[in-house]
Amino acid sequence: MIGAVVCCAAAVGGDNLQDLKAGYLVGATPWKQQLMLGIGAFSCALIMAPVLNILSEAYGIGAPTAEHPNPLSAPQATLMASVAKGLFGGELPWGIIGIGAVIGAVIIAIDEMLKARESSFRVPVLAAAIGIYLPLELMVPIFLGGLLAYLVEKRHGMVGTKDEEARDRIHRPGTLFAAGLITGEALMGIAVGIAIYVSKDRDVLVLPEAFQQGEIVGLVILAIVGWLLYRTGAKSKALGEAGSGPH
């Protein structure tokens, strides 16, 4: 329970930081944002429980079961649960943790060496750690997003630049675009989950077999979204220069 409370508090805190950053980008009034964030925190406490129940009934969460063989992945929750069980049950694999600690120390040392040499290539330990414990289906879009960000920087000739303000400016439109994609995906997942929960049929929204071209359609849509995201970032420098006032 303590782990759950701390994890939820950290998640809400991180979400609030993202909201404040978005407000800064668009020129929102801070005290108005803080007021609405307080209302949002209270509202989410009332909404999260029924939403999670719907998702659990519709998709399953975490461990696969006979009823839900392909549940929603919860790598962060699984990691927290494993640590909590290990600490209280005395079954924590200290050998593996020690290996991870050594690997982390080596990565940090390499990153500090690259920093001392003022290299444009860095090895942040947090990114490496996320790549180790997140499942592959989550890491692939993260990698593709990072690749698009690199291509945007290359398009503007800013690869390896130390001008963090300029880099932040060219990435702002793409960041907002990506935030909208994440929000839309989450809302659609809940909408589909409600349909499954009400109908008690996991295939209630499945297309007829003649129209099932999921993999091809999915790849085409992914390519279109990736191109739009790149285009948004590629035009961002001109937009930033045209509107030099507060944002």
Image (cartoon, helix red, strand yellow):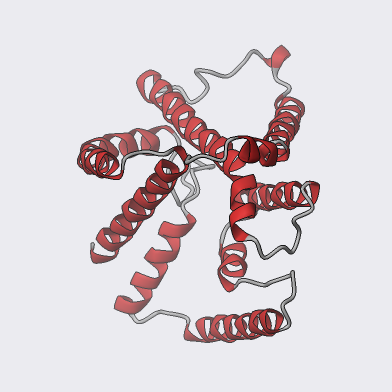
**In front: 102, or 65?**
102
Q: Is residue 62 above or below residue 40?
A: below
Looking at the picture, tell me which residue is in the foreground, 93 or 65: 93
* Corner quadrant of residue 129: bottom right
* Percent position of residue 134, x then y: 57, 59
Q: Is residue 152 visible?
A: yes
Q: Residue 240 placed where, x, y %?
A: 62, 40
Name the residue at 41% across, 58% down. 77
Left or right of 224? Residue 33 is: left
Q: Residue at x 71, y 80 (%)?
A: 114
In the picture, residue 214 is in which quadrant?
top right
- Count numbered badges in the picture: 0
Placement of 11 over or under 31, stated as above or below:
below
Residue 67, can we see it?
Answer: no
In the drawing, does residue 7 fall left or right of residue 73? left
Q: Please report the residue visible at 71 percent of the width from the left and 62 percent of the height from the top.
A: 161
26 with respect to 128 (left or right): left
Which residue is depicted at the point 35% across and 71% down? Answer: 85
Residue 150: horizontal and vertical position, in percent? 74, 53
Quarter that holds the N terminus: bottom left
The foreground one among 176 and 156 is 156
In the image, taking residue 220 as reference, residue 98 lies left or right, namely left
Determine whether 180 is above or below 113 in the image: above
Q: Where is residue 88 in the image (x, y as percent from the top left)?
A: 29, 77
